[in-house]
Image (cartoon, rainbow, N blue to C red):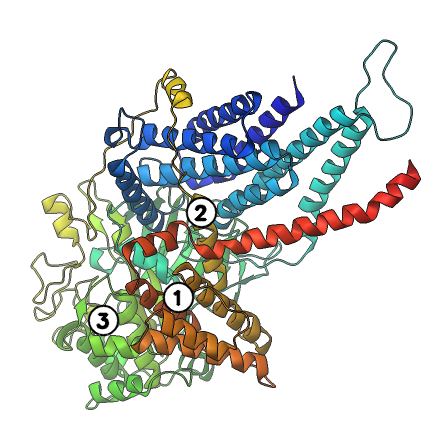
Amino acid sequence: MSGRVRLTLAAWAATLMAACALLPLVEPATWIVQAAFLLAVQAGVGAAARRVPLARPLTVAAQALVTLFLLTFVFAREQALAGLVPGPQAFERFILLFEQGGQDIARYAIPAPLESDGIRLMLIGGVLVIGLLVDTLAVSFRSAAPAGLPLLALYSVAAGLSDGGTDWLWFLVAAAGYLMLLLAEGRDRLSQWGRVFGGPSRTGPGEPGGAVAPVRTGRRIGVVALGIALVVPLALPTMNGGLLDSVGAGAGAGSGGGGTISAVNPLVSLRDSLNADEDRQVLSVKTEMADLSDLYLRIVSLDDFDGTTWKPSRRSITAVPDGTFPTPIGLSADVKRSEVDTSISAAGWYAQDWLPMPYPPSGVRISGNWRYEPLGMTLVGDHGQNTRGLTYQVRSLDVQPTAEQLAAAGPAPEAIRRDFTELPDSLPSIVARTARQVTADAADPYDQAVKLQDWFAVNGGFEYDTQVQVGSGSEAIARFLRDKQGFCVHFSFAMAAMARSLGIPARVAVGFAPGSPQADGTVSVGLRDAHAWPELYFEGVGWTRFEPTPNRGSIPPYTLPDTPGSSVPDEVRPSQSTSAAPSAAPSASESCTPEQKKLDGGCGSESPQAALPTGGDGPPWYAFLVWALAGLAVVALPLAPMLWRLRTRSVRLGAHGRSEADAAPHTLAVWQELTDTAWDFGIPPDESLTPRKAAARIVRLGSLDGEPAASVHRVADAVEQVLYAPHPRLTAGLTDDVRRAAAGLSAGASRAARLRAVLAPRSTARVLWAASDWWSGVRQRAVALRPNWGKQG
């Protein structure tokens, strides 16, 4: 076998091994077989073109052309000429599939179903593009080292989305593929230049010599490097987390009863669940609870409010208590309660780090590695443990306080008041002012809480709409109070903040509202049952649920003044769980009620999408011969730049610390994201300008005005503050400012410019610059070492 053929096979294998990191993201994993076959055809075309031989650019063009034909036949043959040659309709089909894939990625939890043609196109197309880059660098241009960059990009995308439990395995596979590619290139070079290392040959008489020693040395170095890469991180400190995201490596730190859990924002996941086109079943529940409208499954509570969003605090976790859990904080013996048994089965695709349970739990029977957080009375998976496919039993208390008991509640303990009434200085004054106005004639904290709930759910003129953006700036609650449109996140966040402004301890619970009763006696809980609600603390009763969101869940009976303690809602305030009648103020995105699901056989999607034809199970073998002979000059769809920009944007605008040391890195990262976004829309950066002048240039060339322009200037002011202030400080809302500026740039751009900004962003040139700098450094070091090589020889 010639060295060039061996190198081609190594490049094909390295790409495929790196692509294995994508296997946990989608099920079933049969797509990898199709990707491997198409990748082999692509590599075979390259090998044939080099054998002719064709010039390097023509070889790459031929492979790109065949790659486009392959994708056209698999995904758009009905819109293509002769099922193979793409035209305008085929490209429109690709655009539709990309849009569908993006929506499906946001909608489905990991692993996503392979039935989505959009996701399948992104997977297979992405692997083919990476394969083309690797083959071009390693084989056509005989430079295997830079080929590690696209392989790393492919692995990084997969690692950033996976649940983290087997990341080490996929790293090992991808790294082994890269080392194999390097060794194949080294062997090919040695076969051309001969032995360059001293020492006796170990070949026997009559046996051909070869580069045995260098190859063996390279293998040993590779094994040692892989071992170090896998073992050393185990000795370094790690950060663990996880919440509503279906990813995460677990929450515990170490073994035994100690450890901590970290804060992760669940809001985007919750909104995506509410807007899911398909209301997939998440949990199947069988319970002894008499009133199913009270069957709220709580995942976690958010108690840390920094003025921009609510998050769970960093809490200590312990081993799960044996037998009965401790009595909930603040619950006195004279409050009526009963113990209820509930059995819950999670869907095989639902990988949740936190355990959905009725609140408050008094005992849990579950297998696996779980830890207990005492303050919130929640269970969290330890080191990759999640709910996927689990069945577990929960004993919980059905607490039934009366309105009189809540009204007579005494002051909360000082520790609870301190931790759960804290409000940041950045909170707009309209929040506290509105709370005082709504509760002006209230007699006690309980009466204040009921009036807040009624104002949101009944008489305040609010509308339920899941299409409203969550928002995370300090003005998000103020906008919601002004516009009076939102979904459960807005209602629960606003009521909890207003309750705190009145001195009532409050937090936000995230989980699932009551699901749909089934004929077999179970309750089906779906994606669209995802919900958030406020919990307020009353001494003697403890943490108590309220329901301010209209058309969602059920109004607690202890908040109904006419019949306290009854489970029948007031007819003035209908509950989705007890009435199938339409709302007095219907919304286009109104939630699907359990009765509608049961009687009508389901509800229409909140975001319906047109059905797309499938691409079939794959082309016959002889079609690839036609593709190899076809010859039209078309450029392959650039998936790698788009994926790199998505990942980079997520990192730059992601979570950050709160200390002064974190101010400069976060602010500068946000500024770079703003300038790169402007670059993507045709405004290249000018490093010679000050932040203030650069901002003015972006506003002028981007034709921005109003809030987007103000957002650009606010980010520039924050950059100048961290660069020149003696003590840099964090500026709240910068992430939202960048998103508003990006929306303004997008609104002023043409459709073609918007499409290019997504599929071929100009700012990805930074990758080429970094690669060029890295390669220049490698060549300089190699030149510096050549005198030493000559002396040793």
Disc 2 crowd rating (10 Å Cα; few below 14, some 14-19, many 20+) is some
Instruction: Describe residue 185's horizontal placement relative to residue 337 as left or right.
Output: right
Task: Locate residue 336, reporting x and y percent.
Answer: 28, 68
- Tag 3 residue: 548
Q: Residue at x 26, y 50 (%)?
A: 276
Q: CA distance from mark 1 to mark 2?
A: 21 Å
Q: Secondary structure at mark 2?
A: loop
Q: Determine which residue is flagged by label 2.
A: 366
Work out whether 607 lies above or below 734. Answer: above
Viewer-proximal residue among 177 and 529: 177
Look at the image and tell me in which quarter the N terminus lies. Answer: top right
Which residue appears at 55% of the width and 75% of the height? 663
Q: Quadrant of the C terminus?
A: top right
Q: Amino acid at mark 3?
A: Pro
Of callouts 1 and 2, which one flags the residue occurring earlier in the amino acid sequence? 1
**Spot occupied by residue 361 in the image (x, y as percentages of width and height):** 38, 59
**Disc on the earlier residue, 3 or 2:** 2
